[in-house]
Image (cartoon, rainbow, N blue to C red):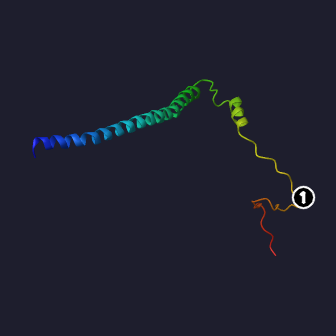
Amino acid sequence: MNLPTVLDLIADREPTTRQDADRLREQITTLTGELARLDGELGRPATTRATLRILAAAEFTADDPTIASAPTNRSWLSLVPSPPACAPRASGSPSASSPRRNMSKAPARS
């Protein structure tokens, strides 16, 4: 090959290579933003875990730990929803709309 042919091949390839490089730069920018968002998302639970470990260790080793005190337990229990009250059935048999059977009694034998 002669020099002008080689230079023409290089010149022909340059726009395609430039487009590929620009496309990769866009992907890098997008991925960098996504990575920053995910790193931030991962940091929140890690910070919470570390804080809870520090607080729990301090309370459990304290002379008067408040983390396991009765008022604290009552506070936590107040956050747990109570089961719904059930109305008694008139006939004593499961209603047609009830998807579960009462399995506490053995079935009657004939």
Q: Nearer the viewer, residue 48 or 102?
A: 48
Q: Nearer the viewer, residue 107 or 94?
A: 94
Q: Nearer the viewer, residue 89 or 23?
A: 23
- Rendered position, 106 above or below 64: below
Q: Position of residue 102 (x, y in %)?
A: 77, 60
Residue 57, located in which quarter of the rendered image? top right
Q: Is residue 34 left or right of residue 75?
A: left
Residue bearing mark 1:
90
Q: Residue furthest bottom?
A: 110
Q: Nearer the viewer, residue 109 or 90?
A: 90
Which residue is at a point 56% across and 25% down the rendered structure image?
A: 58
Point out the image quarter for the C terminus. bottom right
Quick one: label 1, few (<14), some, or many (20+) residues within 10 Å? few
Q: Amino acid at mark 1?
A: Ala
- Describe the element under mark 1 as helix, strand or loop: loop
Q: Position of residue 72 (x, y in %)?
A: 68, 30
Q: Is residue 18 left or right of residue 5?
A: right
Q: Position of residue 46 (x, y in %)?
A: 50, 33
